[in-house]
Amino acid sequence: DGGITQSPKYLFRKEGQNVTLSCEQNLNHDAMYWYRQDPGQGLRLIYYSQIVNDFQKGDIAEGYSVSREKKESFPLTVTSAQKNPTAFYLCASSLDSWSPLHFGNGTRLTVT
Amino acid sequence: AQRVTQPEKLLSVFKGAPVELKCNYSYSGSPELFWYVQYSRQRLQLLLRHISRESIKGFTADLNKGETSFHLKKPFAQEEDSAMYYCALGGGTSYGKLTFGQGTILTVHP
């Protein structure tokens, strides 16, 4: 189904390399979010954007960067400064800041 | 600081039995609470939110501010309820800025 698409599903990188995770939505949602999921820790907010050309840090933004140049796209870059990048990354969007989240299928990043 | 605690990592019940997934929260403001669910091979999705006071798939959850809890309940569990359940707390400037609990894996045995 359409909605919110994350690619790729699996991503492998060497330590020290930056990597960008894609998130695209065709729901015409204003707000978009990146969460990180680690075993036994639930989901933690990395960055969020409530409108195009604007974004804010979440709880664990260090070592990550984002951009929101288009309404439908919110790519996440995991930089070499992120100490523990191996994780499952979930992107989400919502109609506005007060609507429920719609999640993508996630990208599993492995850094060795 | 916001915090959500789901004390049970795993919960097993038999079909037709009542089920309760526990959720406690810590928040100084007015909480907005949600339950999200992830069925096998599906994406994480909203199950219910306290503000709407709906019953979804037979599940209900009542916000108890005195006990700071938002437990999810269903009187008669079904096998298709087997999934990972997350309690989440929103507030402040956005419902999307959620604080999630660690999740509870519910298994309903036939």
Image (cartoon, helix red, strand yellow):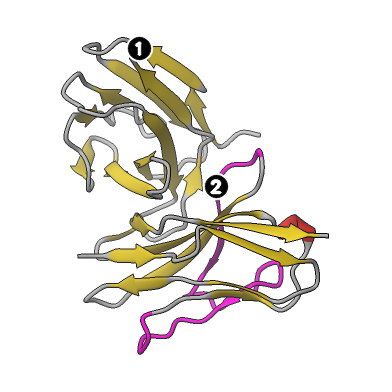
Decide which of A49, B14 is in the foreground and name it: B14
Q: Which residue is mark 1?
A: A13
Indicate the position of residue B105 as horizontal and vertical percent values: 58, 55
**Which chain hosts label 2?**
B
Q: Residues within 10 Å of mark 1 (few under 14, many from 20)?
A: some
Determine if the magenta segment contains residue A102. Answer: no
Q: Which residue is mark 2?
A: B44
Up-down: is A41 above or below A80?
below
Q: Residue at x 20, y 27 (%)?
A: A82
What secondary structure do most residues of the magenta stretch adopt?
loop
Amino acid under disc 1: Arg
The answer to whether marks 2 and 1 sit on the same chain is no
**Which chain hosts label 1?**
A
Q: Residues within 10 Å of mark 2 (few under 14, many from 20)?
A: many
Indicate the position of residue A34 as horizontal and vertical percent values: 35, 39
Indicate the position of residue B78 as horizontal and vertical percent values: 78, 64
Indicate the position of residue A96 as horizontal and vertical percent values: 39, 53
**Left or right placement of residue B107 versus residue A99 in this view:** right
Residue B73 falls in which quadrant of the image? bottom right
